[in-house]
Image (cartoon, helix red, strand yellow):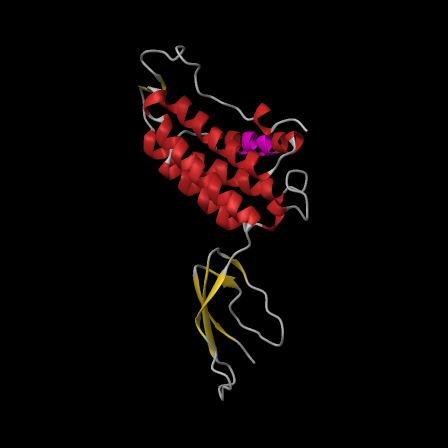
Amino acid sequence: MVANTQIVPKPRLLAGAEPPDGVPVKLLRVAKTAETFGAVMTTLVSEPSSQLKAWKHFAVNLERDFGTNDTALESATGAAFNNSLQDSEVVPAGSPASTIQKDTLVEKMTQALKDGTFKAIPDGAGSVVESAVVAEIETATEALNTAVLDAAVNPPTLVEVTLVPSPSLVATPGYSFSTSENGTISYAGGCSSTTTSAFGFLVRHANL
């Protein structure tokens, strides 16, 4: 298998080749946003052909929402990420990545951009010295990769907060728990609820 790193773009300039006045701000913001996207997709999928298809999604959405401000880059990257996760040629059905809650990962991607590229390189005119901002961006990207890998390998955890007394005289007792990930809830064993989504902390009323 070809190593993942062979197709991950590295927009960073070679040592000694960076212009003394720096790189245009708008160019570097796009390059670093792309680098963050590529790093995450490499974490999620190992096949080079799948990674290339993900890059096509990125290119299409970047062209559609082209701009260098936070809103445009966030929109293009989020759409490309979501499209890639829904594309079976990028993330095959049954693979670990296919079970990840997509909304959660898009949120993590957005937060990494805010903590990294958007914070380190404010949009505007002029130039910026890449070596002066790269550490902050890489820290945010590494944290994102860790979260993505954890989501792909480890299932969400539930921790009971309020237990149902046993025996209970209440037909629909309240049952609450905290979750480590946002997502959709399914019910079994005669339990039901009008609540179908978990967002950090949830109270479930079950018909027992």
Q: Quadrant of the C terminus?
A: bottom right
The stretch of residues the image draws in magenta is: 54-61
Above or below, comparing residue 35 to residue 173 in the picture: above
Q: Which quadrant of the rendered structure holds the N terminus?
A: top right
The vertical placement of 92 against 127, above or below, is below
Which residue is painted at 56% across and 31% down in the image?
A: 60
Say which residue appears at 39% left-offset and 34% top-offset.
139
54 with respect to 67 (left or right): right
Depth check: 165 or 30 in front? 165
- Displayed quadrant of residue 29: top left
| Quarter location, residue 130 | top left
Identify the residue shown where x is 32% and y is 26%. Answer: 124
Q: Residue at x 56, y 47 (%)?
A: 152
Residue 143: percent from left, percent from top: 43, 40
Q: Nearer the viewer, residue 147 or 98?
A: 147
The residue positioned farthest toward the bottom in the image shown = 169
The one nearer the camera, 62 or 182, is 182
- Any magenta on residue 153? no
Res 69 seen here: no
Whether residue 162 sits left or right of residue 132 in the image: it is: right
| Residue 170 visible in the current orientation | yes
Task: Give the dominant element type of the magenta stretch: helix, strand or loop.
Answer: helix
Q: Is residue 99 above or below residue 202?
A: above
Give residue 39's position: percent from left, percent from top: 51, 33
Residue 56: say if magenta.
yes
**Image spot of residue 21 (x, y percent):** 31, 13
* 189 left or right of 124 in image: right
Spot occupied by residue 85 in the image (x, y as percentages of width and height): 59, 43
